[in-house]
Amino acid sequence: MATGSTDKLGALARTLRGALAPIVEDVAGPGGTPALLVRRLGIDRSLAGRLSRALRTDDDLEFLHFLPAPTGLRILLDAAAECDGNAERIKTAQSAVDRFHALIDETPGGRATLDAAISAHSTRARERNEKSSKQAIYKAMSYLLGIQCDGEASCFIMQPADDGETVECLDLNHKVAIRRLRPTAPTGLFGHRLEANSGDDGRGPHVTTIDREAANEPGDLIIRKFSSETLPNLEEYETGPDTTTIALAEDEPLPDTDFTVTLGWFLRGVFQQFRSPGRVDDCRAYMASFPCRTLVRDVFIRDDLHAGRAPEVTQYMPRQMRPELVRHQGKRGRLDTVDIAAPIEHLGYGLGNTRVQEIPSYGPLLEFAFEKSGWAASRFRGYRVKITYPVPFLYMSWWFALPDKPKGP
């Protein structure tokens, strides 16, 4: 939104506030509550609530964002006139509302476009728009795909491997209360590549189970202790070179039933400790494969890895059905990125701040994982991104900037 347009909107907001506030005060007194407006004017509760919220804001653009639609404002003014409100004030307010209506009609895309432009200059407006948009996506995608879940939590734990060059990782994925909304909705739960050991010395890329045993098939990666006691039938499909997708069977579970499934594995020989030619970052990419209410992505990095640097997160549309593995700079790096809030929270060291209210089983899962690994949780610094109503099928990439390898003596 250009500066001139912002100034124009600000001027209109001040005019509307100046016209509406005295009318509301006449009816409900200073600081009048929505309940008083409803009782004395007989207007809808949502209309009264939204108007009161708008009048409580100090910012002009936020006021305009929260303001009810012109139709609702006219209902308010008509009700105020019937209650013997100040006729001159009501006439002034009606003129201001007409200007507001004309602005909406002149804007391509109407109120939605106007709100989107306002949100670029208002944090609260953006947060409100983003939340309502993501919730609408959740409802729509749940219907279209025929499946949803209450929560998904993942954790990626990293420490230096004994070879002094690579990183040993423990990867967890915990999907809670998965529900199929239609009996035959085709649903892939997890995709995984079982890396074959590429060398006799045991240093090649490979995966083992949470018990450090060979993973011969993806079903070996299920952590039964943190999954439903009775799981629906799962089927495996080859979906690429060495890649398998675990999916629900055609007829299970029945609608209105839910289940939880957790996978965990150790990964070796894939991530590096230090920079190398053409490789200055490592990346762990995730995709939310179907709608959920709460998404938590955690990373734990041991104190002697990555020189104490914090990771960074980007979200972007998938390209050619695979994540970006190289972090580009400038415009190329911003291509296909999605500007959705995903702030990283520093959890400190250990597991003291890792509980998730919406996913109670996740805290015990982390404790179990560290116990299985034999690693001291107190040595690992944690980072978290938590999103309500994440957008399905967006990649979230965690980028780890690699330090230079120390020079020998």
Image (cartoon, helix red, strand yellow):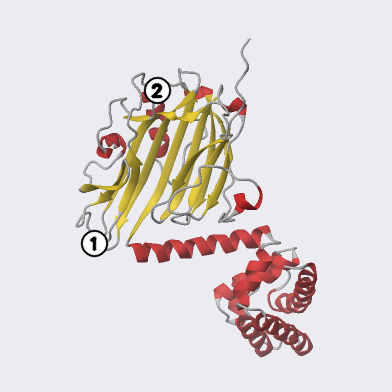
Left-right relation of 76 to 138: right
Residue at 45% from the left image edge and 17% from the top image edge: 162
For residue 407, what is the image quadrant? top right
Q: Is residue 32 visible?
A: no
Give the percent coordinates (x, y) of residue 172. 39, 36
Q: Are marks 2 and 1 in contact (CB under 8 Å)?
A: no
SS for tag 2?
A: loop
For residue 49, what is the image quadrant? bottom right
Residue at 35% from the left image edge and 27% from the top image edge: 198
| Local crowd size for mark 2, using a 10 Å CA cut-off: few (<14), some (14–19), many (≥20) | some
Please tell me the numbered disc located at residue 203. 2
SS for tag 1?
A: loop
For residue 2, what is the image quadrant? bottom right
State whether residue 181 is above or below residue 370: below
| Local crowd size for mark 1, using a 10 Å CA cut-off: few (<14), some (14–19), many (≥20) | some
Q: CA distance from mark 2 to mark 1?
A: 43 Å
Give the percent coordinates (x, y) of residue 389. 47, 56
* Amino acid type shown at disc 1: Thr
State whether residue 273 is above or below residue 247: above
Please tell me the numbered disc located at residue 205. none
Residue at 68% from the left image edge and 74% from the top image edge: 28
Please tell me the numbered disc located at residue 184. 1
Left-right relation of 308 to 209: right
* Amino acid type shown at disc 2: Arg
State whether residue 402 is above or below residue 332: above
